[in-house]
Amino acid sequence: MSAGGIWLVIAGMALANFAIRFPSLAVLSRAELPGWLRRWLSYIPVSAMATLVVGGVLRPDGRWLPPLTSPYVWASLGTGLVYWRFRSFLGATLAGVILFLALSAALG
């Protein structure tokens, strides 16, 4: 496929994504939602992020790794612990990268 074809596919996907999402956002942004529904909807971003992170940690490269010997699992736990303790996204990110590199070298 040519570069122009790839850009055409990307533009088409962006347009389709906008067409699917915009109507519901336009309607819901003006509607007064009950408290229980607003609370329920507030969990969607957290759930989506958790799904992406857990999938990447437990199945890197699309295959399962044994959790006890996986540097991904241990580095993610360490990253979470650093963030929980210091509430620093940058610090947790740096700790996670360093932990992952060290554990990858140690666990081979």
Image (cartoon, rainbow, N blue to C red):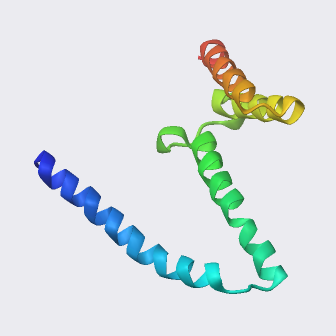
Q: State the quadrant of the C terminus.
A: top right
Q: Could you tell me residue 41's position as x and y percent?
A: 72, 73
* Residue pictured at 63% horizontal, 43% vertical: 58
Picture layout, residue 53 above or below residue 27: above
> Of all residues shown, which one is farthest toward the right?
85
Residue 13 is drawn in which quadrant?
bottom left
* Residue pictured at 69% horizontal, 60% vertical: 47
Q: Could you tell me residue 49's position as x and y percent?
A: 64, 53
> Of all residues shown, which one is farthest toward the front?
30
* Residue pictured at 69% horizontal, 34% vertical: 73
Picture layout, residue 39 above or below residue 50: below
Q: Could you tell me residue 29's position as x and y percent?
A: 62, 78
Is 64 situated left or right of 78 in this image? left
Q: Could you tell me residue 83's position as x and y percent?
A: 80, 33
Is 74 situated left or right of 105 in this image? right
Q: Nearer the viewer, residue 54 or 16?
A: 16
Residue 38 is drawn in which quadrant?
bottom right
> Of all residues shown, which one is farthest toward the left?
2
* Residue pictured at 65% horizontal, 47% vertical: 54
Picture layout, residue 11 above or below residue 53: below
Residue 84 is drawn in which quadrant?
top right
